[in-house]
Structure formats: C-alpha cells, structure tokens
Amino acid sequence: MKEIVAGVDIGGTNTVYGLVDREGGVVAEGSLNTVSYPEINDFVSALVTAINELLLTGDFKLLGIGIGAPNANYYKGTIELAPNLAWKGIVPLGDLIRAKIDVPVIVTNDANAAAMGEMIFGGAKDMKDFIVLTLGTGLGSGIMINGQMVYGHTGFAGELGHVTIVPGGRECGCGRKGCYETYASASGLVRTVLLLLSEMKEKSILRDIKPSELTSKKIAEAAAANDPVAVKALDFTAEKLAFGIHNAIGFSSPEAVFLFGGLAKAGEMLFEPVRKYVEKNVQPIFRGTVKILPSGIPEKNAAVLGAAALVWNEMLA
Amino acid sequence: MKEIVAGVDIGGTNTVYGLVDREGGVVAEGSLNTVSYPEINDFVSALVTAINELLLTGDFKLLGIGIGAPNANYYKGTIELAPNLAWKGIVPLGDLIRAKIDVPVIVTNDANAAAMGEMIFGGAKDMKDFIVLTLGTGLGSGIMINGQMVYGHTGFAGELGHVTIVPGGRECGCGRKGCYETYASASGLVRTVLLLLSEMKEKSILRDIKPSELTSKKIAEAAAANDPVAVKALDFTAEKLAFGIHNAIGFSSPEAVFLFGGLAKAGEMLFEPVRKYVEKNVQPIFRGTVKILPSGIPEKNAAVLGAAALVWNEMLA
C-alpha cells in the first residue's frame, strides 16, 4: 500500500482536490462546484464520496486530509464568516469530515497552505523562516518562523493583506482604508492604473479597456509593450508591495519572501523593482539578507499540493 | 547547593548583573561602569570576576549566564556594530566569556531579554504569543510566537522600532525616515511636543522648558495637570503607538502586547487611548482579542531578570 494524503482547496466557485504522495506527485485529482452545495452537509458528503472514489484508483493508505479554505481557523478546524462562501456563521468543517472518514483533518487558510506547500514541495525546502504572499484579488500571506506556521493566539495570524500601509488610503473590502491588499494585489494594480489614467496625459492602450474588464494580465502585457501608464502602474505597485515586505522583514527577518498568484505572473517586470525598493528602504541591518523569489510550486497543482503539505508536514515531524 | 543563573544587562553607560533563582529572586547583584572598559577583554575580565565574587556569597551552582546587550546576535553570541558602545566591529562576547567561565552563555538584545523575562517571571507566564515593546529613547521589541523568541534568519528579527510608519516622516538615527520609534518612544513624545508647540496657540508650561531638557516624565506630569499641549501630545503618541501595534497584530495575532520603559510610566493616560485606537483600527477579526498591558516585571530588576530568564527558559525546556 502506498501512503497518500488528500489535499483539498475550497474556493468560492470551485473546490479542487487530489491525492498527493510524499514526493509531491498528484496521483489523482478532481473538482466540485462549491456553489452547487449551499448546504454544508451536502458539500461534505460530496467531498468525502469524491475522495473515497479517488482512493479506489490505486492501493492507497490515506494518512489524512489537508484543507485550504478562506477564513479558516487552524486551531478549531472551522471556516468562520467567509464572505465568499454560501455557508454562514461558523462551520466546523474538520469535525464534519472526520465524522464520515476517520483520519486526521487539518484546515487552514489558503495562503498558509501555500506556505506549507512551499516548504514541503517548493522553493523553501531548506528554509525555516520565510513568507509567502499570494497576490490575487486580495493579498494573502503565510508566515513561517522557526519552521512553524504562525497562527498566533487566535489562529488567524498572518493577515498581512489588511495591515494598514496608507492611513486614510483606498477603501478595502474589510471596511477599513489603506490596507496593503488595496495596493499590492492584482486588483490593486487595476486601481492604480485607473488613478494614473486620471493623472497622466500620455496615450495608453489601457484607455481602450473598460475598467470592469481591466486585469493584471492585460496591464502586464501593456507594460511589456512599453505602455507608459502600465509601466508606471507596475512600478508604483512594486513600491507598495516592497513597502509591506520591508516592514515584514523588520518583524521576522525571513530568509526569503515568495510571491505567488496572478500579479506575480508579471515576472521580472515586478520582481526587479520590488527587489530594488526593498533593498533601498529596508533597515540597513537586513540589507542583502532576504531573497525575493517566485514560488517554486507548479501553479497548476499549487492549491492541492499546499493543502496536502499540511498533513505531510505533521507526518514528517 | 542552590541552582542559580547570572543575568547581565549591558548598557552604554552601566552594566548591571545579578544572580537570579528559579522563582525570579535576585539573590545578589552589582554593577560596572561600561565606559570604564574601552577594551572588550578588560570588560570581560571585570565582569567574570564580578560574577565569581557574587557566587562566593552563597552555596551556588551556576547554570549559565544570560546577557542582554544592544545590537546582540543570539545565534552568534556577538555584539555587532553597536553605536552606543566603545567596542567596535563584531565582538564575540559569548566566546570571550566562555573562555573564562565554563557555563552556557546566551546573548540577545535587551528587548528580547525583556520579553523572555515577561514569560518566565512576569505577566506572560501562561502565554505563548505576545509582544513586548520597550519605550525608552528608542523603541525595542521582543516577539514571542508559539512560546519561542522570534530571531529570524539573521538573528536580528523583532526590530519593530524601525518599521516605517510614516513614509518620508521624522529623521531616525538609523539614517532613514518615519521609523516607528521616532513617534512611539519617550524621545518621540518629546519631538511631538515640539511640533505641537509650533502648531498650537494655547498656553503651556512646556513652553518654559528648554527642548534639550524636555523628558517624557515632565510631559506626563504636565498632562496629568491638564496642560493642553501635553494632553494632545500623549494622545498623538498613543495613536502612533497603536498604529504599529495594530499592524503587528495582523502579523502575529498575539494574546497581549506589553508596554515597558520610560514612556509606559505615563500609565493609564497612555494605555487608555492606546487601547481605544487599537480596537478602532485593528482588522475586525482581531477586535477584542489582544490585551494591552503594563509589564508584570518589577522595573528595578527588569534587565537582570530578563537576561537571567534567557537561561532559565532553556533549563526548563
């Protein structure tokens, strides 16, 4: 029998899952429409059935189930007040799953899962102190210190996306203003383009795209074609991203910061100025001590690998 | 024989040391003039001689020596490029002491020692996740996560005093601008008073004190007497202090933040507005989860207790 771990990533639209071996091979996988299950019990039944079906495809011994989900609490195995999920209130996801399949179930938020994936299967294999920033619609963060995930007293630690970087700045979905993710994320880049279109006189192909259809991908493509607004927007975004990073370095002095997700696909157009601004603005004692790196996890399976890594990490301890 | 630990706090002017038992009793103590020993080898000889003399005052078994010092590196046992000490370059303090007295020697910065003291002997005895801010001339910080001190990849983690809170703001001794400690410290409070004296028309007894003689103590006394400039300066300082705290909460979600040192002596005049601003500005998920507390360590012996706690913590592990 081959020892195997199930990794599950619950998103607002889709849930992807897979069986992951010790080497990070995804030996079987599948997906569910999260929105098709407005009742949590129906979702759990469907997920457990799906995992059991995957297990029939080989001679597997299931060691545990790792789950990445929005607003997840590691200590309690719950999803709490997730705005983008149909399940309201506090959902005891870990308990519900364990009632149907008797293995360890570990639940944490998706960015923490990404960080664990980076340590077990990705670019942080030999690191004990690093930070992963996931740059999508928002900014998620997973912080590793001394080889341990930082969960804090509440289980919700590592919420760098809502650190205030501009007091009184851009409105955030959390109800506050000036949060890191309103600047340093794919949607933050879009907002920056809109600001620059208001300030700059230069021609730009971005003036021919409806604001509702602007994406970080289109902006990165425009920047690659030397569109002046796109180039300036990427630089501004890199500076804001670097600001949050240099302050995080003062906190935990990581060996590396990994950038992951939609915005990170801009590649060196983003990484190069981020590195420059971090080095320029970080406290002198930390200059030259931190690598700014792309994720070492293949993006296709990143969410499933990260979730599975939660369990492999505990099995290896 | 009674098991005992030596705690040493090296300051720019004075070095205090003492023998500390498991319960936090300081059973013997003394001090040296740091400035009288411009040669590090002379200092080490004097310190070891002094500790040996203390040990003769009872039937003691020395378990180790804990040292708090500016710019100390825990991993290497060094003091590195300390601007306020005569010893230049990288001083291998741990090795120099061990060459003369064969016990474990642990070196870390003074704020980390304060945090360890808080956990072993003070108000954080039952806590695993907390932060200590020392509010003196600068702002030092010691961060505990999962019951472990955060040293980071370099050994210099927990430098919250130099997190940027106001881009382009006040000049800092580190050569940068807008660092947390230029606002949230005893000297930051003095700078705020000078700013407010320039902006406000109200009468103030602080107008009769030379700027070079202004202290946080005098300002707190003026605030207690309802001096309008002093009252406003304390509120402004509390807001800035709270800003750094609410961002630190997003990072590590501590159970408590302890305030220590000269500025903290302002008491509830400082703590009450700090609590108010933290609750108002922290991310909603963390509201009501963090206590803002005065240190539970008796100030008289705080430095020696903190340094000794470094060793007791390892003995108890």
Image (cartoon, coloured by chain):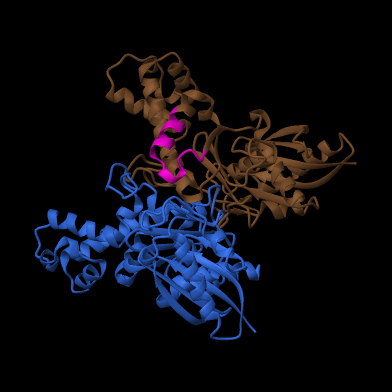
Chain colours: A blue, B brown
Observer-nearest residue: B152 or B32? B152
- On the picture, is B23 further left or further right than B69? right
Q: Is residue A112 above or below residue B40?
A: below
| Residue A14 shown in magenta | no
Q: Nearer the viewer, residue B96 or B148?
A: B148
Residue at 40% across, 77% down:
A300
Residue A131: x and y in percent read 47, 61
Residue A181 visible in the snapshot: yes
Question: Does A28 sit above or below residue A66?
Answer: below
Q: What is the quadrant of residue B75 in the picture?
A: bottom right
Q: Quadrant of residue A38?
A: bottom left
Residue A295 in percent (x, y) is at 43, 71
Q: Is the magenta region chiefly helix, strand or loop?
A: helix
Report the residue at 32% width, 64% height from top: A273
In this rendered view, identify the residue nearer to me: B301 or A210: A210
Q: Is residue A124 visible?
A: no
Expressed as whole percent of the image width and height from the top left, the position of residue B291 reads: 53, 36
Decide whether residue B275 is among the magenta residues.
yes
Q: What residue sits 44% from the left and 70% below the top?
A: A303
Establish if B234 lies above or below A119. Answer: above
Left or right, residue A234 beside residue A52: left
Report the magenta residues as a range. Answer: B273-290
Please give the name of the residue rendered at 42% of the width and 33% of the height, measured from the top-left corner: B188
Number of labels in the image equals 0
- Image quadrant for the N terminus of chain B? top right
Q: Position of residue A209 (x, y in %)?
A: 13, 66
